[in-house]
Amino acid sequence: MKKYFVSAIALLSLGIFLQACSPPGSLISHQRDAEFYSQFVNPAADWPQAESKIDELKVLQTGSDYPMRYVLFDNGKFYYQVDKLGNGEGVWSYENGAMIITAQRTIFKMELAVSAAKDTGEETLVRFYDRHGFNSLPIYFRDPAKLKQQGKAAKELKQFTRSEKNI
């Protein structure tokens, strides 16, 4: 009995290790060229004010089940807000037909891939691993300037729920 328990623990540990070390390429749904992703990027001049100007900037955001907001800049940097985790900054790059987004947190490295949901169309996904395993969520593009040009008002961003976890 003890032998099986130790084997089960070893197998579980190996699975967690492999998930944590999975290469970003395994997170990509459908590859697209860099032009597809350029629509999501803000000018680097807005980078220093990302947190205070987030309502005015292009934002990639998920739904309310796992609320996240990502603001990308053409200098390869990004600002993020993840409810119940915190906010911060990191770097992004275009690799293997997707946007690879990374940020160093206190106790782990965030690594996500934003890729097309299908071979055609505008739908996008964000994929990543967290402590519960693999996640694949629709991510929505919000461009207030484009909506204003169309005579429409951008929906207000969901209020960010700050976290003091510092993880």
Image (cartoon, rainbow, N blue to C red):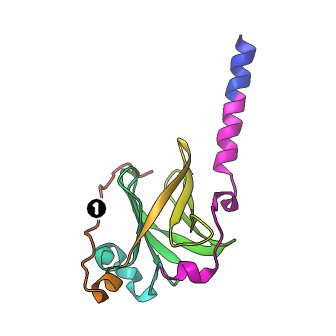
Residue 31 percent coordinates (x, y): 66, 70
Residue 6 lies in what quarter of the image? top right
Residue 127 percent coordinates (x, y): 56, 57
- Side of 96 relative to 100 (left or right): right
Residue 147 percent coordinates (x, y): 31, 82
* 29 inside magenta stretch: yes
Q: Is residue 85 visible?
A: yes
Question: Residue drawn 30% across and 79% down?
Answer: 56
Total labels: the figure holds 1
Which residue was labeled with disc 1? Answer: 158
Question: Residue drawn 45% across and 50% down?
Answer: 167
- Side of 61 relative to 136 (left or right): left
- Side of 157 relative to 82 (left or right): left
Q: Specify start and end residues of the magenta stretch as a single range.
A: 10-39
Q: Is residue 131 above or below residue 87?
A: above
* 31 inside magenta stretch: yes
Please tell me whether mark 1 sits on a helix, a strand or a loop. loop
